[in-house]
Structures are given as C-alpha cells and as structure tokens.
Image: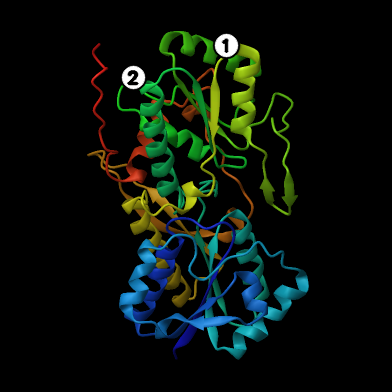
C-alpha cells in the first residue's frame, strides 16, 4: 500500500537544503510507492497547523529549480515544541495518511526528529533525519550538507578581500564567519590560499581561547611585514574565561545572535596598535549564496534526501543519514551514506579536532585543508598580480 511523505525543514537554511528536498521528491517519483510528498510550510509549527502542500503536483521543470534556489523554499522555524505538541502529531499524520516523516536540519532538528520518532512508535509512522547545517557540527557524520557551500563562499570571499588588501596595503581587515560553538566555516577560509603568504594571515576559532595580547602581537608583526593583513574570526569567539568576547545581543532557546566580533577586533587594532582597521560581516550572505554553491555539496544533499526516503520506506526509523568518508588507496575523495541511530546525534555538537588547529591557535593545519578541500568543489579562480615579483 502506498503512503504519503511529510518533509519538515528546521533551523537556519543553507544553499543546498532545497537540494535535499529535491532528492526526496525524485526518490518518491521513481519509487512508485508514494502518493503525495507533503511539505510542512513554515517548519515544525506547520505540522501542528496542518499547513501542508503536495509537492508531487508541481511539474518537474519547476521542481528542478530547487537545486539552485537559496534558503528554504518551504520555510523553516525555530519553534520550540512541547510534550503535548509531540503527542498531537500521530493523529495529524493519520489524518493525511502520512507514513513517512523526514526532518531536515541541524542538532536541534535531530533532537526534534528523535522525539517525533518516539511519539510515533505505536502509530506505524517512520521518522528519519536528513542532516543540514553550515556549522558542520553534527556528530558522527564526516560532514553535513550545507557546509561545503558555506566553506566555498568564505574561501572565495577571503581570497577576494585578500587581493583588495594586498593592492592597497594600508590596513587590517577582519572578516567574521558564522559558527556558534564550532569554527568549521571560519577554518575553511584557509582554502583561499594559493601560495604561502596569501590571505587569510590569521584564523581564530571558538575551539581555542582568544588571547588578546597574542592577537595584537601577531597583527603588529604581520602589518610591519606586509602592510595589509586579513584576519578571519568566528562569531562565537570566546576569551580565556570561556565567555564570548562580545556578549550576545539576543538569545532565545538555542538561537544566539552575537554582537559584531569583527568590529570588536578591528577596534582593538585601532585603539591598541594605532593601525587603520575595518571589519566585514558577511553573515547570512555566506549561508544562502547560490553563486558560490559547491556542486559537491549539492550532489551530496540530493543523496541525503534520497537515502532518507529509502530508509523510511524500508521501515528503518529513528536514524539520520550520515556521510562516511572512505579511505581509498588512490587518495580520491569518496563517501557513502550510512544510517546513524538518531540518539547519537541529538544535540551532540562536534567541534574541530585539535589536529586541525595549529599550536598557537591562530591558524589551521594542512591536515584540515586536506580534509576540507574536496567539499568545496572546483578550484577557486586564479588572480593575476603583477606586483608578486617586484
């Protein structure tokens, strides 16, 4: 007997979250075992409001646009579900003949996924998680859909800013990257480098305490050598006391909105070193950019959507689709999808390992660059610089 699917998006969007949705729809159409693919419009709150749209009714030429559509085409939310909300869901699913529920999101959404799975155990509804976050901080999986594109964006942006600063080497530029407790996106700025000496010159991650005096000493030394310096710092940067260097300006649930860390660091440079400095904060530009979308990221997002529906149709609920990197003899990048028990990823944050961070805590290692490089897709474009050999 055929059943219906419900797809729910949670938390902040990415450049490829719609690609996972596309993967679900493609798998549903090819399987011939699904009648409707419902989207919960507006995230988990859309379930309770029964605000559903059948995506199977939309022509293929329109559905294919999901692959190049930023943000989430069906809406998302950070709605905090209560115990009674979970208890109300099985009846809603039965009303719409929904047999498979797929939740696409990060740590918080996987927590929701696990709780819906528990609530639906007696109803025969299969619940599966699709990973999504630019922060790349979900446990077990090698990486998450959304990160590769955010990494490509920050690397390209840093390379372009680096050329600007090099061509007019009179100041320090501090770029702020997203990442609440994990510095994966910040670290990916290292992929901007084509040769030694290229920007970024300093990288600061939330995994290491920020030491103001060391920061100023490093900036001063580099400015004396180069004239222009590019720094990339995480929005979640913390001091030696474990507190954010800039207190959050707003916090609700798990969502934290930080003050301008880049502006704070730039002001330190101006005030303590008397060096001209400026700050840049791409913010959500970096998580929604289709122009810098990684094709590898897009393809893997589609795969995650397909594999999630496959698992659900096989009756294997309470899992999240993760990626396991294969250790090949030829060194080529290759991953396979694996079904990870949902309890292993519910609100478990994965920080950058120590082997990916240099000893001083102001850069990443070659090991990180090697790990990250395949995820961003094609090589970044080369720039011409007539001043290189002067």
Label annotation for residue 386: none
Q: How many marks?
A: 2
Residue at 37% x, 48% y is 292
Q: Secondary structure at mark 1?
A: helix
Please say if the residues under marks 2 and 1 sit with CB atoms less than 8 Å apart.
no
Decide which of 169, 63 is in the foreground and name it. Answer: 169
Query: Where is residue 212 drawn, in percent x and y?
Result: 65, 18
Which of disc 1 and disc 2 is earlier in sequence?
2
**Residue that badge 2 annotates:** 196
Residue at 56% x, 81% y is 52
**Residue that badge 1 annotates:** 217
Q: Would residue 61 appear left or right of 2 to someone viewing this image? A: left
Q: Secondary structure at mark 2?
A: loop
Q: Would residue 138 appear left or right of 272 to someone viewing this image? A: left
Q: How is the image coloured?
A: rainbow
Residue at 57% x, 88% y is 96
Report which quarter residue 376 is drawn in.
top left
**Is residue 52 visible to us here?**
yes
**Is residue 121 visible to us here?**
no
> Where 233 sits versus 68, above or below?
above
Give the quadrant of the C terminus: top left
Badge 1, how many Cα within 10 Å: few under 14, some, many 20+? few
Report which quarter residue 154 is drawn in.
top left
Query: Where is residue 118 drawn, in percent x and y?
Result: 66, 70
Query: Where is residue 207 drawn, in percent x and y?
Result: 59, 32
Give the spatial CA distance, label 2 vs label 1.
Answer: 20 Å
Decide which of 289, 41 is in the foreground and name it. Answer: 289
Decide which of 377, 346 is in the foreground and name it. Answer: 377
Give the quadrant of the N terminus: bottom left
Residue at 73% x, 43% y is 249
């Amino acid at each position: 007997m055929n059943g219906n699917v419900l797809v729910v998006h949670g938390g902040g969007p990415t450049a490829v979250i719609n690609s996972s949705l596309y993967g679900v729809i493609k798998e549903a159409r090819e399987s011939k075992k699904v009648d409707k693919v419902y989207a919960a419009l507006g995230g988990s709150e859309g379930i309770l409001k029964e605000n559903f749209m059948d995506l199977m009714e939309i022509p293929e030429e329109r559905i294919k646009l999901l692959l190049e559509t930023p943000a989430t085409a069906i809406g998302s939310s950070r709605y905090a579900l209560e115990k009674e909300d979970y208890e109300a869901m099985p009846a809603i699913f039965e009303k719409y003949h929904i047999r498979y529920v797929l939740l696409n999101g990060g740590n918080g959404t996987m927590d929701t996924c696990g709780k819906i799975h528990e609530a639906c155990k007696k109803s025969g509804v299969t619940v599966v998680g699709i990973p999504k976050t630019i922060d790349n901080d979900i446990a077990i999986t090698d990486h998450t859909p959304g990160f590769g594109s955010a990494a490509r964006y920050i690397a390209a942006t840093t390379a372009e800013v680096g050329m600007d600063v090099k061509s007019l080497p009179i100041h320090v530029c501090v770029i702020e990257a997203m990442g609440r407790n994990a510095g994966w996106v910040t670290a990916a700025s290292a992929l901007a480098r084509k040769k030694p000496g290229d920007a970024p010159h300093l990288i600061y991650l939330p995994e290491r305490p920020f030491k103001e005096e060391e920061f100023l000493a490093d900036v001063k030394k580099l400015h004396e050598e180069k004239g222009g310096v590019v720094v990339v710092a995480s929005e979640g940067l913390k001091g030696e006391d474990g507190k954010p260097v800039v207190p959050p300006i707003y916090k609700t649930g798990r969502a934290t909105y930080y003050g301008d860390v880049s502006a704070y660091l730039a002001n330190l440079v101006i005030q303590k070193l008397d060096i001209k400095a400026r700050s840049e904060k791409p913010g959500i530009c970096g998580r929604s950019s289709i122009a810098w979308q990684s094709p590898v990221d897009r393809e893997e997002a589609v795969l995650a959507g397909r594999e999630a529906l496959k698992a659900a149709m096989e009756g294997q609920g309470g899992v999240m689709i993760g990626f396991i990197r294969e250790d090949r003899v030829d060194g080529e990048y290759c991953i396979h999808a694996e079904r990870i028990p949902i309890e292993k990823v519910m609100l478990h944050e994965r920080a950058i390992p120590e082997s990916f961070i240099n000893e001083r805590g102001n850069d990443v290692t070659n090991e990180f660059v090697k790990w990250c490089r395949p995820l961003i897709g094609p090589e970044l474009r080369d720039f011409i610089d007539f001043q290189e050999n002067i």
